[in-house]
Amino acid sequence: MANTDVTPKLRVLLVEDDRDVASVVCLALEDFFDVSHAATAHSARLAIRSACPDLVLLDWHLGNDSGQAVLAELELIGSSSRPPVIITSGGEDEPLLEAVRIGSACHLPKPFSIEELVRSVTRQLLRRKPSQGDLK
């Protein structure tokens, strides 16, 4: 008899314009999570609205666009109870530093190891933002 009690994997959206990085990250996470990929800020905003990911891994520098636009979309629609993990080699950007400082994002600097990636994603998926009722 087949086991029908299968827990669905948590959904992770990777927003990354570098194909090589995206391939490695998706391969590293696909055994543990349901991973989808968006290569542009526009496609990321569409995926956030349609797929409601449990966590977003967000490259801060997306070609001609910025991860800041995707972060603003996440905050606008409140799509996730967890702050996104921003993956970038440039961590000196003031909006990025501010997002990390106020807790609306976490930072995983590039280059990172597979172990650091899995640990960071798992840690964020185990966290949740307090709801309004928790703050009283």
Image (cartoon, rainbow, N blue to C red):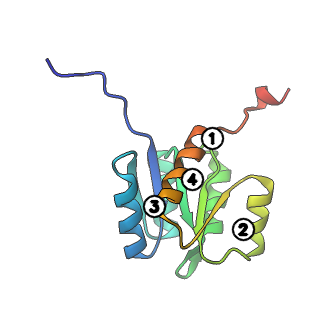
Q: CA distance from mark 2 to mark 3?
A: 23 Å
Residue mark closest to the camera, 1 vs 4: 4
Residue 109 position, x and y percent, is: 61, 69
Please give the residue where the numbered disc 3 appears in the rendered image: 114
Q: SS class of the residue under badge 2?
A: helix
The one nearer the camera, 108 or 78, is: 108
Which three-letter amino acid code belongs to the residue tagged 3?
Ile
Name the residue: 40% across, 53% down. 29
Please give the residue where the numbered disc 4 appears in the rendered image: 120
Earlier sequence position, callout 1 versus callout 3: 1
Which three-letter amino acid code belongs to the residue tagged 1?
Ser
Q: SS class of the residue under badge 3?
A: helix
Q: Which mark is residue 81?
A: 1
The answer to whether residue 90 is above or below residue 43 is: below
Please give the residue where the numbered disc 2 appears in the rendered image: 96
Earlier sequence position, callout 1 versus callout 4: 1
Q: CA distance from mark 2 to mark 4?
A: 17 Å
Earlier sequence position, callout 2 versus callout 1: 1
User: Could you tell whether 59 is left or right of 133 in the image?
Assistant: left
The answer to whether residue 41 is above or below residue 133 is: below
